[in-house]
Amino acid sequence: MTTVQTPLMQQYREIKARHQNAILFFRMGEFYEMFYEDADTASRVLGLTLTARNNGGAAEVPLAGVPVKAAGDYVRRLVQQGFRVAICEQVEDPRLAKGVVRREVIETVTPGVAYSDDLLDGGRNNFICAVSSPVRGAGADLVGIAAADVSTGELRLITTPATELDPLLARIAPREILLAVGSTQPLPPSRSDALITERELWEFDEALARDDIARQFSVLSLDGLGVDAGDGLAVGAAGALLRYLRELQPAGLPQLARPLIERPGGVMPLDEMTRRNLELVESLRGGGSEGTLLSVLDRTGTPMGARLLRHWILAPLTTRAAIDARLDAVERLAGDPAAREGLRDALDDVRDVERLGAKAAAGRSTPRELRALGDSLAALPAVANAVQRVATGGRLAEMLDAWDDAAELASHIRATLVERPPIVVGEETTIAPGVDPDLDALRELRDGGRDAIARIQSDERTRTGITSLKVGFNKVFGYYIEVTKSNLHLVPTDYQRRQTITNGERFVTPALKEHEERVLSAAERIEARERELFEQVRAAAGREVARLQGIARVVAELDVLATFADVAAREGYTRPTITDEFDLDIVAGRHPVVERMMPRDKFIPNDLHLVQDARMIILTGPNMAGKSTVLRQIGLIALMAQIGSFVPAASARIGVIDRIFTRVGASDNLVRGQSTFMVEMSETSAILHTATARSLVLLDEIGRGTATYDGVSIAWAVTEHVHEKIGCKTVFATHYHELTQLADELTALRNYNVAIREVGEQILFLHRLQPGGADRSYGIEVGRLAGLPQPVIARAREMLALLEGEQLARGEQLGVRAPRKQPASTDQLGLFAAPPHPVVERLASVDVNAMTPLDALTLLARLSDEARRHA
Ligand code: ADP
Ligand code: MG
């Protein structure tokens, strides 16, 4: 009878009531069963068959189950789909249970709280965040964020203006976010991929949290952690986060390192659009890392290094001293190829010490992983040696002075475990010989038993005369003696038959069983003792987790610094000069990603100088000239400098920038699909509200998502505002050559264009910046290059001439009519209608295609004279 007893369902309901927002994996023997809605969800998401069970006469219960052995994969799939999974185990031996077996939820896995390698990516953190509600701070609304990665033990407490929450979350990319119920904090839409978990408001209480955190880190007051009064909101968030984590892991909160504190102003906030448009860690197409700055820079050797590099790219520094400290270290390593290579070689032997340490602390590492931790630690002295000779000062020396490689732990692990231990204790030898006398004695016993059994084979062959007789072993019958059919008549009477097989029979003897008993009981005790010893050494490693986290940080930093040095040498980057002045001065700059997509030296470098009284550039040029490339390369070079990397330029002087904004006009913005003008405008508006004089604003074809005159007008007004009210360094790429007139009005604005050369009807893209505005857009030439058929091109030329003629006729050509002081409003532009003009009438009758260039020039000169007379 497979009816589900009512008491069992009662137990189920009680447990489920406490885990309502999770899918409950309810252990029943060799299966995890799911009931009711959980069963529906699981069958839908996992493609399991939905069945029903009789609930002791009551209504049928929908049910779906997965075998315990395969559960890991099902959990992973559910969590990847954004579900929480609560694992409920039988916590007493079913044979000893009176009534229903006791069950408890031993762990809840969520997208933000996962240890399993299947759910993690070595190159990036898996953060869960708690976000406090905003509170009015000095001048601005502030929010506090606590972010933890339980797989590495990292904890960050961050306080930031509410307006910076979006860029901040974009940088951390949490998989799960905790918010207070009814939180007034609207979450940025960009975080829609994170699981939102609501918690009670009181859990974010700062006072409660202070005690909790002090207890967690065994300090009397939070001062000892570097937390100060201004961090209250983040502390409150951390309280909520710790409470949640404890709930998910009733057996004990995962080991977290002492918190890193981040306060406003320390790093450059990069909003989502800037991050995407500069293709820092995700490409515009597809979202992979190919074609990103990360892909160019990522030559790290360790997962810790890879994660830190990603973090640095998304959090450029904003103080000169901090940037220079990194650049100094990179310069030392860049200048000494042998040291650099030595360091990178040594780092090759270091595995993910951070996650391996966290796993040990959580009691989750396998023997193989623990050994890998030991081996990684043992590789650290070689890392220190490699750095030694370049570490004559600065950050590198600082790291060496505080060097710790947990040598005792390394030798303890390596002396205790065999060189290649199995994944599970018991399969093969885990604990090395000589470690434990009891274990050695047991092994002798077992081996002695095995030898005795082996001797039985030869003894019995002699006794019976059956030369093919053999002793074998299987899980069901244990040791047996196997005799083939043809020899069965020789079998002695003391043999007891156990099993018939196709070509013979299997027997046992009392002597065989006696030795077997010895071997098997020894093996059982060996496994138990090995497990005990393994757990001891794992616990010893777990107790050192704080040290391991410190070590991981140092390794990560060395790895990234060495990577910067390596890429600099490989790609011909130079050290930028960082200043506290305003100017941005790049000589022969290149785009780090685009240059790699073409043969060496094919990329045309460009200079760029932005100084206080020439701080804005309107960049014009036909499509495909290279405007977008040059624009992004400026942003990338500034960003690379401020993360401490060398830059792709002959030289660069960079006055520290507090923020970079990059906006791309809607129709150029392939990714979003929603090329709505509204999006473009709200993005632009954010810049106008938050940019300061020390920001760098890069605008690419802004205003393009609407009709021409609206677009030009908006672009015009935005440019004026940035020039007059913000005063920051700005480059604005546009194909509205009308905007070049702004230079007459705005003193700090310069026109540049990307040079092309016309050869007959062809145009050649020179990709070189030069002063002055472009005079027209060359759209048709670009169309021809793109392969439009000749008749289409010819017709397009006709149409262009026609349209330009009409525009002139209506007096709408901006170049002619745009008022000087008062920039054109759309009304003036759109509704203006002049009476027919004699010049226009003349023009209308001209057949351009029938004229020689000389005729055209003569006509043009005459018309122009006439126009001036009438003006
Ligand atoms: P625009 O924005 O003016 O339309 P892009 O910046 O998109 O032009 O550049 C178009 C193409 O020209 C790029 O994909 C690249 O292949 C090439 N290009 C751009 N700048 C350079 C350069 N400085 N040197 C060599 N090729 C370049
Ligand atoms: Mg472009």
Image: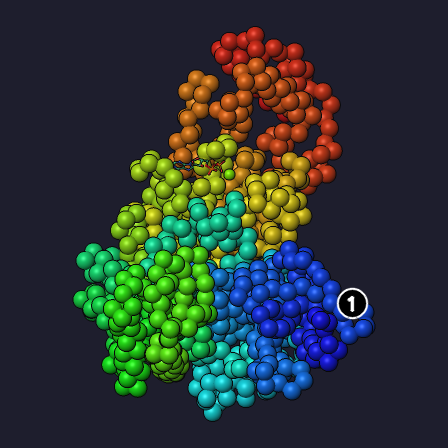
Using the rendered view, name the quadrant where residue 823 is placed. top right
The N terminus, quarter of image: bottom right
Mark 1 CB in 8 Å range of ligand 2?
no
The C terminus, quarter of image: top right
Q: Along the line of sight, which residue is nearer the eye, 248 or 102?
A: 102
**Camera sees residue 729:** no
Specify the farthest residue to the right. 58
Tell me where residue 635 appears, x and y as whole percent. 44, 50
Q: Along the line of sight, which residue is nearer the eye, 842 or 44?
A: 44
At numbered mark 1, what does the secondary structure look like: helix, strand or loop?
A: strand
Residue at coordinates 33% horizontally, 59% vertically from top-left? 301
Q: Amino acid at mark 1?
A: Glu
Numbered disc total: 1
Using the rendered view, name the quadrant where residue 756 is placed. top left
Q: Residues within 10 Å of mark 1 (few under 14, many from 20)?
A: some
Specify the farthest residue to the bottom. 220
**In the image, residue 246 above or below residue 472:** below
Residue at coordinates 66% horizontally, 61% vertically from top-left? 42
**In the image, residue 739 above or below residue 775:** below
**In the image, residue 216 above or below residue 805:** below
**Label 1 sits on residue:** 60
Tell me where residue 726 appears, x and y as whole percent. 54, 56
Q: Along the line of sight, which residue is nearer the eye, 731 or 436?
A: 436
Tell me where residue 519 appears, x and y as whole percent. 35, 78
Tell me where residue 223 appears, x and y as whole percent. 46, 86
